[in-house]
Image: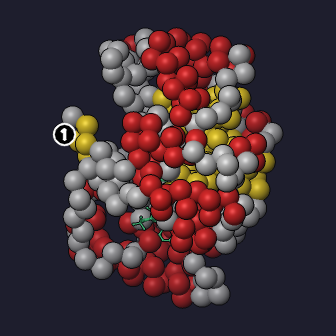
């Protein structure tokens, strides 16, 4: 597994990181499906162990994934995986209860302690603000940043991160939060990383970057033959393309074209979908959701950036454009 220097953190992490949103299992909050069906603790633990064996030593979780369940699974693994070999990231910033906002300073302090306990560690390597919603007139921004800096000074966290589904929002708040690492949503069809100005901020500030949902939750792999309805509690039910036979057929065509072009690669589509993002991000890594051993084993062969020409070709296949495209994000 290729290692990348995660910007000014100076830490060398695997170019492919292990995402554990699905390890929280199915979940519905306020009528909204926010989890993943089909979760199995034993299989998820096996996937984490396989990720470690594959050299994937950057793991990403959050307080909200299964309301701490994903963190607890990771925390149970330290007799199998040496804690000091894992670069461990978690997040706060989704669930406000019992406060009026998820960045209430007391809530952040409580969640840092809860994450330390669930993860069975005395220091979290990277602690993200999960979303760039800082309340009316941004009233929770300063307090949130202050709590994280205090926690960093106290040695409870090593580095501060900032994340959101919108690269525009991350670009807007990054100069205020001054994170060492940003985590934006980015894949070959939803790509505002450069056009939002975030790429320039990352490059100019020597920040690390971890891209999430590069497979768009598996959809972009072109592996769905039929419109699919997932069991209750699975957020993929909110994504129309999983139920759209024309969209699925188009993605199968993309898969076939990519498999022809990268015929010598064992996992051509995974290689293309991750390599296209790594190509213009020297301090970047790609998070892949890994809930089965086979996901981690396949990921072990990834992590190489595409050349500019290859990346333009892949974008052309998926979007009809050779330039990174704008989207709603
Ligand atoms: N900061 C944020 O707001 C945010 C938001 C979303 C995600 N994330 C992070 O990013 C991680 C990844 O994003 P994501 O969960 O949206 O998922 P993703 O990486 O876009 O897709 C994961 C899915 O792709 C399929 N897959 C993965 N590896 C595969 C392989 N080797 N072969 C075949 N299929 C494979 C699996 O589908 P099947 O299970 O159907 O096989 C898997 O569940 C999350 O786990 C989380 O850590 C962060």
Q: How many marks?
A: 1
Q: Residue at x 21, y 34 (%)?
A: 30
Q: Is residue 288 visible?
A: no
Q: Which residue has dot 1 on it?
A: 31
Left or right, 216 with reference to 3: left
> Quick one: 74 or 100, which is closer to the camera?
74
Q: Is 315 rendered above or below residue 190?
A: below
Q: Please give the name of the residue rendered at 39% of the width and 13% of the height, measured from the top-left corner.
A: 137
Q: Which residue extends farthest front?
A: 79
Can residue 298 be seen from the camera position used here? Answer: yes
Q: Position of residue 236 (x, y in %)?
A: 30, 56
For the rendered model, the colour scheme is secondary structure
Residue appearing at x 28%, y 65% in the figure: 242
Residue 150 lies left or right of residue 172; in this view the side is right
Determine whether, in the image, residue 224 is placed left or right of residue 156. Answer: left
- Say if 192 sits above or below 45 in the image: above
Quarter of the image with the N terminus in it: bottom right
State the residue lying farthest toward the left. 31
The x and y percentages for residue 24 are 41, 47
Q: Residue at x 48, y 62 (%)?
A: 43
Q: Is mark 1 within 8 Å of ligand 1?
A: no
Label 1 packing within 10 angstroms: few (<14), some (14-19), many (20+):
few
Q: Nearer the viewer, residue 304 or 175?
A: 304
| 263 w.r.t. 289: above or below | below
Instruction: Decide which of 284, 100 is in the foreground and name it.
Output: 100
On the image, the x and y values in percent for residue 172 come to 52, 29
What is the secondary structure assignment of the residue under circle 1? loop
**Frontmost residue, 161 versus 152:** 152
């Amino acid at each position: 597994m290729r290692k990348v220097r995660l910007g000014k953190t100076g830490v060398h992490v695997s170019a492919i990181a292990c995402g554990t949103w699905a390890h929280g299992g199915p979940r519905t909050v306020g009528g909204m499906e926010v989890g993943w069906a089909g979760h199995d603790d034993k299989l998820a633990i096996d996937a984490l162990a396989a990720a470690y064996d594959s050299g994937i030593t950057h793991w990403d979780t959050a307080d909200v994934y299964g309301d701490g369940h994903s963190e607890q699974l990771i925390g149970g693994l330290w007799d199998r995986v040496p804690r000091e070999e894992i670069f461990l990231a978690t997040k706060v910033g989704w669930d406000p209860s019992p406060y009026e906002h998820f960045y209430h300073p007391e809530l952040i302090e409580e969640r840092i302690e809860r994450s330390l306990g669930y993860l069975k560690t005395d220091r979290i390597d990277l602690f993200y603000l999960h979303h760039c919603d800082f309340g009316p007139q941004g009233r929770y921004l300063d307090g949130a940043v202050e709590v994280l800096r205090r926690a960093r000074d106290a040695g409870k966290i090593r580095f501060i991160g900032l994340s959101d589904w919108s690269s525009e929002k991350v670009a807007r708040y990054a100069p205020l939060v001054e994170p060492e690492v940003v985590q934006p949503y980015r894949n070959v069809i939803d790509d505002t990383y450069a056009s939002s100005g975030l790429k320039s901020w990352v490059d100019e500030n020597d920040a690390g970057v971890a891209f999430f949902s590069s497979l768009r939750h598996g959809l972009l792999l072109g592996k769905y033959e039929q419109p699919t309805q997932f069991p209750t509690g699975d957020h993929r039910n909110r994504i129309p393309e999983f139920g759209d036979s024309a969209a699925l057929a188009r993605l199968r065509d993309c898969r076939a074209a990519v498999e022809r072009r990268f015929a010598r690669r064992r996992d051509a589509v995974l290689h293309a979908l991750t390599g296209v993002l790594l190509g213009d991000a020297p301090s970047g890594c790609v998070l892949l959701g890994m809930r089965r051993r086979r996901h981690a084993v396949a990921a072990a062969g990834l992590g190489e950036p595409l050349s500019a020409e290859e990346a333009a070709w892949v974008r052309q296949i998926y979007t009809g454009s050779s330039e990174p495209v704008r989207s709603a994000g």
